[in-house]
Image (cartoon, grey):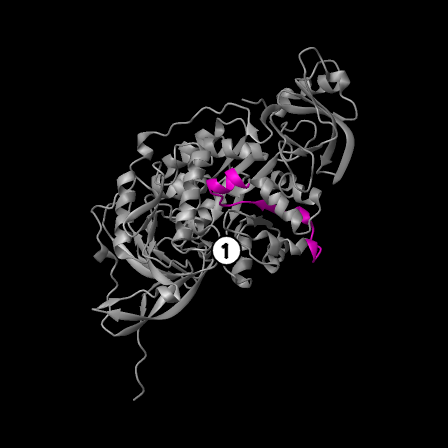
Amino acid sequence: MQRPWHQSAPQLVDVAMGRRPADLVIRGGQWVNVHSGEIIPGTDIAVAEGRFAYVGPDASHAIGPQTQVVEANGRYLVPGLCDAHMHVESGMVTVTEFARAVIPHGTTSMFIDPHEIANVLGLPGVRLMHDEAAGLPINVYVQVPSCVPSAPGLEHPGAELTPDDVREALTWPNIIGLGEVMSFPGVIANDPKMTAEIAATMSAGLTVGGHYASPDLGRPFHAYAAGGPADDHEGTTADDAVARVRQGMRAMLRLGSAWHDVAAQVKAITERGLDSRSFILCTDDSHSGTLVHEGHMNRVVRHAIAQGLKPVTAIQMATLNTAQHFGLERELGSIAPGRRADLIVTSDLVDLPVEMVFARGRLMAKGGVLTADLPEHPYPETARNTVHLGRTLSAADFDISAEAAEVTARVIGVVENQAPTRALERRLPVRDGTVQMDPAGDVCQIALVERHRGTGAVVNGFVSGFGYDRPCAVASTVAHDSHHMIVVGTDKADMAQAANRLQEVGGGIVVIAGGEELALVELPIAGLMSDERAEIVAAKADRLVQAMRDCGCTLNNAYMQHSLLALVVIPELRISDMGLIDVTRFERVEVILPDPQPAA
């Protein structure tokens, strides 16, 4: 456990003065100073007690017989990267395995909101992830989930968190604030639950995370900002980013596996000249395939630079800005005396190859390979066996009945690379009293299968945008945020087989085509996470993506789109265990619209 700065300060002073040798000295680097915005050549760094003790032109006075000396050879010295908003569960691995995957990419600090596991296991699930995070050799702070369920009255999760639960969790040592407040209607209406949770967090001096998913930037947006959320990651346009920053919020620009919101919003800086200090980079949701093959926050920084940001500015938005936002500027986010000795050694600030990673002064990764030992963290049996359908499903469970020869149906429209959906309407034929899909028109079925209480309930609807062109089905117990089971398919027998298969393995994602299992990712921990290594899960996820492509799907990271179709706090149309939900009005609507009455 690293000691606080005030306890280590005398030793740091001695190292800086040359009265005591450093534990580590890195010589001859180019210091990326995120405080001043400079790149300072010929810089040495001395580290003691896991903190920076000296950053200057010559640290030879701090080198003793036992000091580890690393030659930077003119390479850049960059603060360890911070992910300001993310959900570990989206990586389909545990906190430890997530850290194992991202450390080689230069991520040394994460701010996680475990509201996925909270929807399945409640406060005990949050505590499991909190305690695991606290034991890691990098900085993993936890935000208390604020909206479990995300939309009361429109869904039933496996568990709920009350204001009393939030108040209790705010006393835990590794809590940094309140997780994204998704119930923006609740904030706007002064809902007692939301008001109590925000007040408790602000009273504790911690940060309230935001989630304003409405395009309405009028009075409701102003009311939301007045309610207390300090940031927001749901913007998709430059106007969204500008609006948030003008109201004193931090605009979090995300590049996850499927959410590509940086390019549009960063124009608020590059074209409209806003101060970059109010902007932060994050990932939100990254699955294991992205982490293993493409990177993590280094990927986001590279992308931001490619959109026209200066490298130092992009790095500030992934380091110092994040630390300042969470009140941790004196601990994280920069290479400066007293801060935790988290840094990256890289030879190129644009492509950002991560050649060495240090966390708290310890070498963690070199050449893209983890060098530190992170012991496995087992989860108890109470976190397993959480998929309870109550029965075996059949193809008939996915029938949608109608009496007319043809009907107009509401259809969820998937929007590639964005979280919002569109509310579509399509004319569909009816055969033998059952509404038919329209594969030629890219309309297939979606079902929400209740999986927490074993009720056997199935809610059916239609979805467009996946492009499936053969008999198939994809089922997942990752179904944000209540995490029932989402099944999407063009063949009802395959849909039933997929749902039953996930009940059999205790959760995960499966692709069935013509009765054949093409891919399976087992997620036995709360139906959300694997207990295997990230690279193993990534290989299974690769097979999953390929199987979806083999079924005709061309969407980028279609699985992530699939998993959010039950998120009833993001417009326009979603599905829950209570039915089809119009998220522009926050009310349940019928799948089949009434036919207009002929004029008299």
Q: Position of residue 559 (x, y in %)?
A: 42, 49
Question: What's the residue at 65%, 39% (across, down)?
Answer: 352
On screen, residue 247 above or below 298: below
Direction from residue 155 to residue 14 in the image, left or right: right
Question: What's the residue at 64%, 24% (across, down)?
Answer: 51
Q: Quadrant of residue 382?
A: top left
Q: Position of residue 64 (x, y in %)?
A: 71, 12
Q: Quadrant of residue 489?
A: bottom left
On screen, residue 331 above or below 407: above
Residue neighbourhood size for the residue with mark 1, other residues' Cα within 10 Å, grouped as few (<14), some (14–19), many (≥20): some
Instruction: Look at label 1 and name its amino acid.
Output: Gln
User: Image quadrant for the C terminus?
Assistant: bottom left
Closer to the camera in the image, 584 or 302: 302
Check if residue 283 falls in the magenta segment: yes
**Residue 516 seen in the figure:** yes
Q: Position of residue 358 (x, y in %)?
A: 61, 27
Return the residue at label 1.
418
Q: Which residues are magenta?
A: 270-294
Q: Position of residue 413 (x, y in %)?
A: 42, 62
Check if residue 451 falls in the magenta segment: no
* Secondary structure state at the residue bearing disc 1: loop
Q: Residue furthest top?
A: 65
Direction from residue 588 to residue 35 in the image, left or right: right
Closer to the camera in the image, 314 or 232: 314
